[in-house]
Amino acid sequence: MIAKHKGEIPVVVLILPFLAGIAGALSFLDTRIVFFLTSLILLTALFVILNLAYTPLRIYKVRWLGGLLIYPIIFLLGWFVTLNHHELNKSKHFSKIKAKQLVAVITSEPRVKDDMVRFTADIRQSVANHQAKQTSGTLLVTIKDNLAKNLFYGETLLIPAKYTTVDPPFNPGEFNYKAYLAGKHIHYQAFFYPGQYHVIAAGKGNPIITHALRIRQNLVEKFKQNMQDTAAIAVASTLILGYKAELSNDILQAYSKTGTIHILSVSGGHVAIIYLLLSWALNFLNTSKRGKVLKAILIILLIWGYALLTGFSPAVCRAAVMISLVISGKTYSRYISTLNLLAASAFALLLYDPFLLIDVGFQLSYLAVAGLVVFQPIVYQWVSFKNKIADKIWLACSVSIAAQVITFPLSAYYFHQFPVYFLVSNLLIAIPVFVIMYSGLLLLLLPQTPYLSKALGYLLENTILLMNKMLGFIEHSPYASVGKIWLTRLEYLLLYAITIMVFYFLYDKKKWLLTSTLVCLFILSCSISFKKYRADQTSAITFLNLRKHTGIVFKNGNSGVVLTDLPETDKNFEYSVQPGLDSSRITSYKVYPLNAYINVPFLHKQNNVVQFQNKKILLLNNEVAYQSIPRQVHIDYMLLSGNTRADTSILKDKTIIIDAGNSDKYIKEFINLHKNILYKYEVLKRNKSICIASNWHN
């Protein structure tokens, strides 16, 4: 459904300046909140005065004046609420108060991985000199202790006031974990060992959430009681209850590469399935107006009850808010725009927490629903079938196509891949997902009985295993996904512009739409082509910050050599090295250990000396490494690692790279000892990787 006039979708029109205000504030979080609050109050007061004086001052003759004021008011409102929600703007934030100890209340369900326990905590008090001060702020806490596995939401801990800022991405293409946590109001993290923390109280969290999480734990245990396969239990817990703690990376990869990752996020689709079931079950109430109202109330209460079972996860709450507004609107009005309801729910959630705007799940969920509302009817009209079964299949296809088209630019921008067989995957899992949802919910809602519960568990388990096998087959099929898609912000915005204008042209054949689409397509092609040409013509040396490990990437056009002590299968390689190779368009590369002999057309390595085109690098990782090197050999760069002592004579006239694996004490002593003779030096520890790029081969 596309509104022909903006009057049909006023909330959509009005939310745009609100989104712009939030986006502006997110880019300039250091701006003064007083200016925006004062401007907002003054403009709002002026707007009220003009409305009160509408007739006496004949304001109706200049109707545009109201519109002129309402847009900046909403823009300023978005900017103000964002600055007001920014934790670091709070005067009582724990980072601004000196303390020896902190009183922290666990605000998330602790997640156990190996011997680590991680959770977020609300810092309520800062303690210094036996005096406590009220504080605010969220801290990400990681504890390496088996006893910490017994911690639960709402427990109060006394912890040392030892925390650090969250590290930014150090290497090219690396996931920006700092920005991700900042969107969740987390700017500091702490790491503790046994004996460094003490539980001093319990039950300090929200009692509703506490109860919800305990119910969810009991329901997960019920899955384990009636199912055998651990992978099936993990998928059931994630798909039905939003409990992702036991989900393996292999399962996540299979669902991601087949374009079905959305079913593992309990959100709009799952709530819609429950809504369909409830709507069908309560259909007998449609006979009267009061019955319809009662039906709406019951459905909304039961949907929020399901949200309670999932632990009030953000995705479910978003979906519950959206569908509650839709149900209310449809119940009390003959016609109401779904886009207006969608915009209203987004406005309500962003007013509560404007930082949701930078949450990927928030963006994708609202885009997917908007795509279904706007694009799905257009796609559905492309083909018509007289056969009812064929028509239903095409209806499901149109839903999948619309959702995938509208979310593709954003998902490609964030996740750098596109599932080729998404249509087949989504069709194949449609029936299994319904079976899983309904059998799983039935298993959880009914009391434990010897035969019925086991039968439902058997059905649930085998349906999940069948679905996993189907998705595994698609995942390993030829050309199952297109990977290594790295878009700039301009490119993904151009993709959205092209997508919207193409669908608009299909709806309303206007020449300017076709012309604009071709112009955007030309700009996009030029951007991608220029990026590829530049990457193919560039040579570079990148000294990576791999913390306790060493890594250097030598790029020669689209070919490369990675010199590192990390195996290619290591998760740190996948997290810190692989994204850089993909983003810099190195399509052909080989990984070598630090002690390897290498002889390729653009690089030669013997012992600890690397010759890359016309540059020489010395890898100084032991004290005798440079003793066999003739002093007349010119060295351009020297990488120091392993806390190695270096002879003063060899340090002169060279660029020294101090690896991140060296200790803080070693780095400090090395700089103090040699600062008078060092020509140039760079420290990788807690700093971004160092890229030395040039077109040496041209």
Image (cartoon, rainbow, N blue to C red):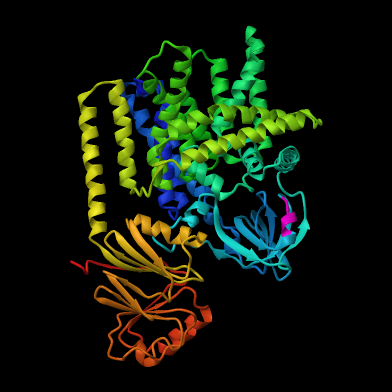
| Nearer to us in this view, 590 or 108 | 590
Asked if residue 187 is positioned above or below residue 632 in the image, the reply reads: above
Q: Residue furthest left?
A: 698
Q: Position of residue 59 (x, y in %)?
A: 35, 24
| Nearer to us in this view, 465 or 203 | 465
Q: Is residue 612 left or right of residue 436?
A: left
Q: Is residue 390 left or right of residue 320?
A: left
Q: Position of residue 169 (x, y in %)?
A: 45, 60
Q: Mainly helix, strand or loop, the magenta region?
A: helix
| Nearer to us in this view, 434 or 178 | 434
Q: Residue sitting at 44 percent across and 25 percent down?
A: 397
Say whether residue 53 is visible.
Answer: no
User: In what quadrant of the picture does the C terminus appear?
Assistant: bottom left
Asked if residue 453 is positioned above or below residue 191 in the image, the reply reads: above
Q: Position of residue 344 (x, y in %)?
A: 49, 29
- Specify the quadrant of the image occupied by residue 519: top left
Q: Position of residue 416 (x, y in %)?
A: 40, 47
Q: Is residue 276 left or right of residue 567?
A: right
Asked if residue 323 is positioned above or below residue 412 in the image, the reply reads: above
User: In what quadrant of the picture does the N terminus appear?
Assistant: top left
Q: Residue sitting at 23 percent across and 23 percent down?
A: 510
Q: Residue sitting at 62 percent across and 26 percent down?
A: 274
In the rendered structure, does residue 149 fall within the stretch colored magenta?
A: yes
Q: Residue sitting at 64 percent across and 43 percent down?
A: 234
Say whether residue 530 is visible.
Answer: yes
Q: Which residues are magenta?
A: 148-152
Asked if residue 108 is positioned above or below residue 610 in the image, the reply reads: above
In the rendered structure, does residue 352 fall within the stretch colored magenta?
A: no
| Nearer to us in this view, 327 or 388 | 388
Q: Residue furthest right?
A: 450
How many marks overall?
A: 0
